[in-house]
Image (tube, rainbow, N blue to C red):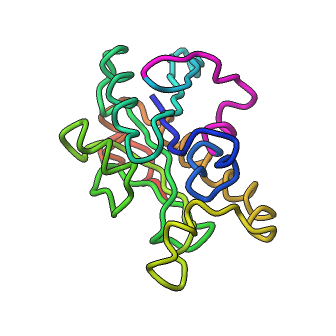
Amino acid sequence: MIAGLGNPGPEYALTRHNIGFLLLDKFAAGQKFSKKKFSALYTEITRGGEKIILLKPQTFMNSSGEAVRAALDFYKISTSDLLVLSDDLDQDFGATRFRARGSSGGHNGLKSIIACLGHENFARVKLGISKPPRQEQVLEHVLGQFTAAEQEQLPAILDKGLELINKWLAQPTAGDRNNPSAANAAPPLK
């Protein structure tokens, strides 16, 4: 399962906090997220003979874990087969990063998922949105629209995110996906 994080509603569509939704849309390549369940919009695709659930929680960012947990439980998917796509304030705008596990880094969507799963052992692709100059501007920044300059860079950034998703999917087994240094695994994801 691949879960993109964001906030529902057209007013949030092109905000920095919704870059996880945008990356999932790009990965889905025109698939409609028309199914509603688990407090989420979702669709199913098949890649290399493997069914993949693509999930967009509709609970708002701070409660994303409820939808992710419900979908994992329903489909009986192990968290080793979960990839979460999110924004990251701690990276420069346009930077991309794969993490096999780890803390929330202060991201409320990841905090919610960790709380609902009871652990941090799930993979994530994080797309940098940069920090604003002052801490009190964080909420306005993450919920703000991309600037014109950022929008121009967005296609290339999403392409870099797609590369990380595809590398994660290319790992031979779920265990290898979250342990890129395992024998027979592809090189570490960057």
Instruction: Give me the residue at 50% from left, 26% from top.
Output: 40
Q: Which quarter of the rendering shows the N terminus?
A: top left
Against 21, residue 93 (above or below) is: below
- The residue closer to the viewer here, 34 or 52, is 34
Which stretch did the figure color magenta?
A: 23-38
Against 66, residue 145 (above or below) is: below
**How far across and down, in percent of the image, does residue 154 sit?**
73, 58
Is 157 on the left-hand or right-hand side of 182? right
**How far across and down, in percent of the image, does residue 170 sit?**
50, 35
Instruction: Give me the residue at 79% from left, 71% from top.
Output: 149
Instruction: Give me the residue at 36% from left, 47% from top.
Output: 180
Tell how many labels. Answer: 0
> In the figure, residue 64 lies in which quadrant?
top left
Q: Does the magenta stretch include residue 181?
A: no
- The residue closer to the viewer here, 54 or 67, is 67
Q: Residue furthest bottom?
A: 133
Against 108, residue 84 (above or below) is: above
Instruction: Give me the residue at 55% from left, 23% from top.
Output: 42
**How far across and down, in percent of the image, does residue 101 sit?**
30, 50
Is 83 on the left-hand or right-hand side of 87? left
Is 18 on the left-hand or right-hand side of 58? right
Q: Does the magenta stretch include residue 31?
A: yes
**How far across and down, in percent of the image, does residue 30 sit?**
75, 28
